[in-house]
Each structure stands twice: as structure tokens, then as C-alpha cells.
Amino acid sequence: MILALLVTTLGFATLIFVQEAASPPLVYGAYYAGTLFMLYLGVRLFLPHSDVLLLPIVTLLTGLGLVMIFRLTYNVEGAQKLALTQAVWILIGSGAMFLLVLFFRNYDRIFDYKYLLAIAAVFLIASTFTPLGYSVNGARLWVDLGPVNFQPSEFARIALVVFFAGYLAEKRDVMAATSRSFLGVQLPAIKYFGPVALVWAASLGLLVFEKDLGSSLLFFAVPLLMLYAATGRTAYVLLGGILFTLGSFVTFLLFEHVQLRVQSWLDPWRDPDGTGFQILQSIFNIADGGLLGTGLGAGFAQTIPEVETDFVFSAIASELGLLGATAVLLAFLAFTYRGTKIALLAEDDASKLLAYGLTAMFALQTLIIVGGVTKAIPLTGITLPFVSYGGSSVVGNFILTGLLLLVSERAGRREAEGLVYRDDPWGSP
């Protein structure tokens, strides 16, 4: 934890000399360090047996994101408040995590309300079609509640993971059994598969009509992976892959927004000053960084539109180089590894599936946005967890981490009580 705080402190100290802005970096740095360190102490006090590395990794990623947001927006007129806003959202996310730690240590009770959470998730997504919803860059993702604007899908997907974990844990045996086939694929009885398919289709369909391609991919892939983890049947994955291919082709034909994204991915030089501008600037910045980077504050990543949200990884690769970008990806990999380990050590099926689903969602979100800004896959409008600017994303990922800590606490307590044959469940594998 101290190492994570020192890395962020070094970043803010660098900005003092590079951008000649002494006061704001010190204020933001102290604010962030105090918030995360107090949260760490609270977690260690109330969850003494939980995974000790998750929160330091989160601290490192949020700190790096705060440094990059301040660096990218400090000299941009009217955008200097973004770093302060992000710091406030970090405080809100920390508070949400602390409330989870304090009041939801018996987290398994939430599985009793899995159907209510599924309904709430669908209504959250549908709220963007009400008069409160509005569009940004062609995607109708936001809800305006006066002083607060947020993306409902960021919280809906956590609720859906809880629903799928509870339902699949309850019905995994009957869903692993088969009663009929479709295109040669053995399927369970419709009365067992129906609730999963209904919630899945409702949430996914709404997201498609919102033109939220990134969240649509997450909402499709994560339940599919959880279904495979619960039943062990590869046929579900194969059928899901076929349906995904067909669905992608249909959405490409129906939505001009999707066609522009695919065209800018295949040939950004067709319109270098229009649809291809963002991805070209991203590639230029990543290439300019080289092995060691231009140095914090010395790159030109601010030439990328909306760089602090979708393209913050490009800015990191530009100014910290291949080594710095790789270190960041390793931090995401470490978080994914710890989440997977929590799932393996969890004592019951629902907890295992919950930890696995949350970890899979975190890992896939990282892969999708990094793949998009490096032109490996078409760009989708989602954020890099903990690093990108965005209040809904930050708070949602703090809640995700809190749930993982709760699951790890119960596994660690079992170890302390001598119920499993390991000296340290959170030590080396």
C-alpha cells in the first residue's frame, strides 16, 4: 500500500516541475492518499482475513488515473476541474466500499433477492429511454438527475452478475443436465434456462438499442462465461459464439454508428480528419512513446479527443512508454489473478460464481478498451477500470472490489479456523 502511494506521489511531484503547478497537485495528491489509506485501514480492521493485495492495486490504478487526468486537463481551458471531480468520485466510491464492508459482511443474503436485483438492473438500463436519459457521441447511456449525471449500465451489470451467480448456483445441476437439442447442441429444460435467457435478452436488447457496444459485449460475454463455469458445458460457449457472430452482423447492418466504428477500425485513413482521427492520434501517441516514453507531461496525448476517458491508456503508453504501459497491464493482471484465486477458494457455489463473474467482467472490460485504443479490435465506448475519468465507472469498480473483499474474507476466515489445508490462502500459489 505504501509503495502504491509512493508511486502516485512521485507522479504528482513530477507534475510540479513539468507543469509548474505547485498547489493543485499537492492538494489532489494529499486528498487521494488520505482517502485511500483510511479506507485501507478500515478494510484491514473489519475484514482482517481478506485479500491484502486488492486494495493496494486499486490504489495504484486510481492514483495513476488521477495523475494522468490532472496532467491531460491542467492546461485545457474549462477542464481543470475534471481532476477535482474525479477525486470526489474516488471519495464516493471509497465510501460505497466502506459501507459494503461495514454492513454486508453476510453478503450471501443478497442472493435471496436475486430476482429483484435482475428486475432493478433491467429498469436501470431502461431508464435511459425516459425523459431523464440523453445521448453522448451517438450512444444513449446517461441519466440526468440535476447535479448528478451517471451511467446506469455501470451498476446494472453488477446487479446482473449477482443474479446470475445466485440463479446458476441454485440450478447448476439441472442446467448441466440436458433434455433437448438445438443445432446439435444439448440444452436444458426451458423452465430452468428461461429466467436466465429472459433477463439476458432484456438487458442485452436494451443496450443494443442504446448503441452501447462496449457494455453490450460485456453483458453478453460475462453471463456466458459464468454459465460455462457453472455447468462445464462447452456447447453453451459454442452456441453463444454463433449467436454473437450473427448478432454482430445484424447490428452492423442496422446501426450506422456501428458501421462507422468498424470502418474507422479497418481503414482509419479513409477519413483521417473525421471518423479515423481519434484512433490515428492514439496510434501516433503510442508509437511516439517508444520503450521508455516521452516523460510525464512531455507527450502530446492531449491531441486525442476525449483522451481522459476512452484513450487514457494511449496517454500512458505515450508518456511512460512500453515499459510503463506493460507495468499498468501487469497491475490489471494481478487484480484478475487475485479475483480468480478468491473464486477458487470461496466456500459455496454462489460465492465462487460471484467472484468469478466480477473478475471476468473486470478483465474483459480492460481487454476491450486496450484492444480498441491499440486498433486490435473496433473501438467501443467503455472506460479503463479505475484509470479513466468517469464517476459511474469509478464507483461501480469500487463496489466490485468491495464484493470481492467480502468473499475473500470468508475464505480467509475458514483458513484461520483450520477448515482448509493452507497456511496462507492469500500467499504464493
Image (cartoon, grey):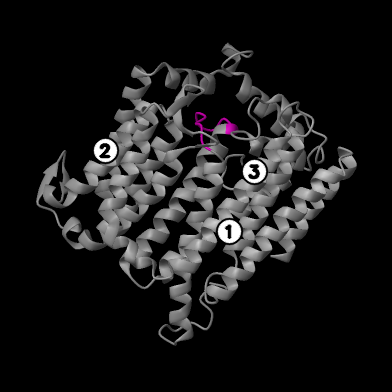
Q: Is residue 189 visible?
A: no
Please, is residue 272 above or below residue 400 in the view? Answer: above
Q: Secondary structure at mark 2?
A: helix
What label does residue 382 carry, if any? Answer: none
Q: Percent position (x, y) of residue 392?
A: 52, 43
Q: Write the start and end of the magenta stretch as one range.
A: 373-382
Quickly name the residue at label 3. Answer: 86
Residue at 39% across, 28% down: 210
Quickly name the residue at label 2. Answer: 201
Q: Label 2 is placed on what type of residue?
A: Ala
Residue 353 shown in magenta: no
Taking the image as shown, residue 190 lies to the left or right of residue 413, namely left
Name the image quarter holding residue 317: top right
Q: Residues within 10 Å of mark 3 (few under 14, many from 20)?
A: many
State the CA–CA distance, disc 1 to disc 3: 24 Å
Residue at 43% across, 74% down: 410
Please, is residue 66 above or below residue 266 in the view? Answer: below
Magenta span: helix, strand or loop, mainly? loop
Q: Secondary structure at mark 3?
A: helix
Eye-nearest disc, 2 or 1? 2
Q: Label 1 is placed on what type of residue?
A: Ala
State the CA–CA distance, disc 2 to disc 1: 32 Å
In the orientation shown, which residue stands out farthest toward the front?
A: 146
Taking the image as shown, residue 140 lies to the left or right of residue 374, namely left
What label does residue 334 carry, if any? Answer: 1
Q: Earlier in the sequence, mark 2 or mark 3?
A: 3
Residue at 69% across, 51% down: 63
Total numbered circles = 3
